[in-house]
Image (cartoon, grey):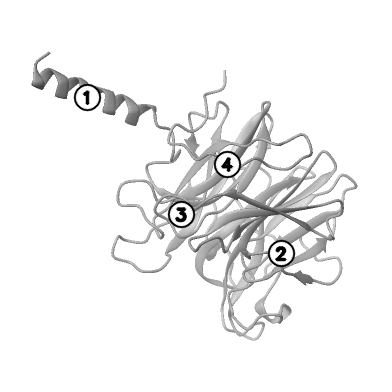
């Protein structure tokens, strides 16, 4: 075989690998902080949107996007139906968020920063937007922040009230967890726009930020971005009650490609368990230009989570 033929074959093989590589799943913009839900047989994915340049040395996140799929292979971009400018009280960037459905409405809990005004001296805050459909339009549900920095005083820094995750238990009680540096949680009223009781603060082992809370087969899971080896890893705890106590279970995701941060989003869909996260693997990507990926998630018989295997191939298309 001639040398130039070998080179051509090698190039074709590489091209096939590139084409077959699904991860990152969104390639036309930079996305981060994935949050999936399932509604009427469709998986909707809510993400942040990194707009930092290659020269920037900090996050610039303009808005929140919605994508959808029915086969885990083709993704439709529904645009950016929500941004910090949706909230009259907000300033700054579109940090991690999660959307959840209840009583036919979709509540999108977001983290951004609060303006310095008569309500707050500034700092991170959590807001909630609402829509009649999973793709919007969304509007500010209460006209003010649900959580402001002044409500949580366990840590001195101004960015501890970020990264909300919300779930509704089998008995109908809703909970919100969030935090940076420490984890906070509170019950929500049935209307999903008011807190129902005091805020509780605790510190899971190695916790940094980005909690994701859900229930599976009677067991509660608290999955979060952790100190790891700096960059972040993903670790988790389990409990038999959402109020705890939480039992530390270990690391399930090692460092990701070319990004200091990672962020979990977990969902069961059409018979499979999926683990969404972000890395910096796209061309010109990095810690401030991230991209959402998805790989399979597997559980042991006792409910513990197996290590996530990060791949470029991603997951198989569903029929």
Q: How far is disc 2 from disc 3 in space, using C-alphas?
A: 28 Å
Q: Which sits earlier in the primary sequence, circle 4 or circle 1?
A: 1
Which-is-in-front pick, marks 1 and 3?
Answer: 1
Q: How far is disc 2 from disc 4 in space, using C-alphas?
A: 20 Å
Crowd rating for badge 1 (residues with CA inside 10 Å; few <14, some 14–19, many 20+): few
Point out which mark residue 204 bears.
2
Label 4 secondary element: loop
Q: How far is disc 2 from disc 1 in space, using C-alphas?
A: 48 Å
Q: Which sits earlier in the primary sequence, circle 2 or circle 1?
A: 1
Is mark 2 in CB contact (under 8 Å) with mark 3? no
Q: Which sits earlier in the primary sequence, circle 2 or circle 3?
A: 3
Q: Can residue 78 be seen in this view?
A: no
Is mark 2 in CB contact (under 8 Å) with mark 1? no
Name the residue that disc number 3 marks: 49
Q: Which sits earlier in the primary sequence, circle 4 or circle 3?
A: 3
Q: Where is residue 55 drawn, in percent x and y? A: 28, 65
Q: Can residue 317 be seen in this view?
A: yes
Q: Where is residue 166 drawn, in percent x and y? A: 73, 54
Left or right of 92, for residue 5? left
Label 2 secondary element: loop
Quadrant holding the N terminus: top left
Q: Which sits earlier in the primary sequence, circle 2 or circle 4?
A: 2
**In front here: 130 or 24?**
24
Name the residue that disc number 1 marks: 10
Crowd rating for badge 4 (residues with CA inside 10 Å; few <14, some 14–19, many 20+): some
Is mark 4 in CB contact (under 8 Å) with mark 1? no
């Amino acid at each position: 075989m001639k040398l130039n033929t070998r080179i051509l074959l090698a190039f074709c093989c590489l091209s096939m690998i590139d084409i077959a590589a699904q991860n990152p799943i969104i390639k036309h913009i930079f996305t981060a902080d994935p949050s999936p839900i399932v509604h009427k047989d469709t998986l909707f994915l809510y993400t942040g949107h990194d707009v930092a340049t290659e020269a920037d040395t900090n996050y610039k996140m303009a808005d929140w996007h919605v994508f959808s799929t029915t086969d885990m292979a083709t993704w439709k971009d529904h645009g950016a139906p929500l941004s910090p400018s949706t909230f009259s009280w907000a300033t700054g960037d579109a940090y991690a968020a999660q959307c959840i459905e209840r009583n036919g409405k979709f509540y999108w809990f977001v983290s951004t920063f609060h303006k310095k005004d008569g309500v707050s001296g500034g700092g991170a805050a959590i807001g909630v937007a609402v829509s009649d459909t999973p793709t919007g339009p969304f509007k500010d549900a209460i006209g003010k922040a649900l959580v402001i920095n002044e409500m949580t005083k366990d840590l001195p820094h101004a960015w501890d009230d970020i990264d909300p995750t919300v779930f509704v238990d089998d008995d109908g009680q809703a909970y919100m967890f969030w935090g940076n540096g420490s984890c906070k949680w509170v019950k929500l009223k049935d209307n999903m726009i008011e807190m129902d009781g005091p805020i509780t603060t605790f510190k899971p082992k190695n916790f940094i930020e980005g909690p994701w809370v859900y229930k599976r087969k009677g067991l509660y899971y608290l999955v979060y971005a952790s100190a790891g080896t700096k960059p972040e890893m993903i670790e988790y705890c389990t409990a038999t009650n959402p109020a705890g106590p939480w039992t530390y279970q270990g690391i399930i995701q090692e460092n990701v490609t070319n990004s200091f941060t990672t962020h979990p989003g977990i969902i069961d869909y059409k018979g499979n368990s999926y683990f969404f996260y972000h890395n910096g693997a796209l061309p010109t990507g990095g810690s401030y230009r991230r991209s959402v990926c998805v790989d399979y998630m597997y559980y042991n018989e006792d409910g513990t989570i197996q290590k996530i295997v990060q791949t470029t191939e991603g997951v198989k298309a569903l029929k």
